Image (cartoon, rainbow, N blue to C red):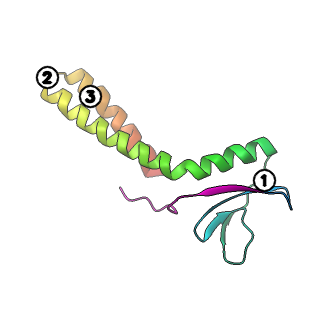
Amino acid sequence: MNAAHTPGPWKMWADDWNDSLHTRAGDFGIGSTGEDATRLATVHETEDEAESNARLMVKAPELFAGLEEAAKHLEQAAYDLAQAGRIDQARATQINAEHARAILARA
């Protein structure tokens, strides 16, 4: 699956001049202000929420890749379980793989 998101690495930093947090990857930013940046969004929230959201945005590409890898391993495990005749476990594992793929498709 190829994601259409802005590839990382994303970086986060605080701007003490205007008391804000910024996240950025290449020419794309959230809350960034430079002329060379394309602003994707401006998010207004409390200070604690801003830092938590910025950290999540920075790690999103890694989380996406990790879930993609987990889905692949779950699919293989479901196949292996089915081959071993452990059908109930194979079905449960396949359901988890499908759930992971559905989350990825919505990202």
Residue 42 seen: yes
C-alpha distance separating marks 2 and 1 = 53 Å
Q: Residues within 10 Å of mark 2 (few under 14, many from 20)?
A: few
Q: Quadrant of residue 11?
A: bottom right
Instruction: Point out which mark residue 85 bears.
Output: 2
Q: Secondary structure at mark 3?
A: helix
Identify residue type, mark 3: Arg
Residue that mark 1 sits on: 44
Q: Residues within 10 Å of mark 3 (few under 14, many from 20)?
A: some
Residue interval drawn in magenta: 1-14
| Picture residue at 40% right of the left edge, 40% below the top | 100
Viewer-nearest residue: 90 or 22: 22
Q: Residues within 10 Å of mark 1 (few under 14, many from 20)?
A: few
Task: Please state, as top left, top right, bottom left or bottom right, where the N terminus lies in the image.
Answer: bottom left
Residue that mark 3 sits on: 91
The disc, 2 or 1, on the residue closer to the chain's N-terminal end is: 1
Eye-nearest disc, 1 or 3: 1
| Picture residue at 29% right of the left edge, 33% below the top | 94
Which is the main secondary structure of the residues drawn in magenta? Answer: loop
Instruction: Specify whether 32 is left or right of 8.
Output: right
C-alpha distance separating marks 1 and 3 = 43 Å
Q: Quadrant of residue 43?
A: bottom right
Residue 16 image position (x, y, % from top left): 84, 57
Identify residue type, mark 2: Gly
Q: Quadrant of residue 39?
A: bottom right
Instruction: Specify whether 35 is left or right of 74.
Output: right
Instruction: Specify whether 90 is left or right of 47.
Output: left
The disc, 1 or 3, on the residue closer to the chain's N-terminal end is: 1
Identify residue type, mark 1: His
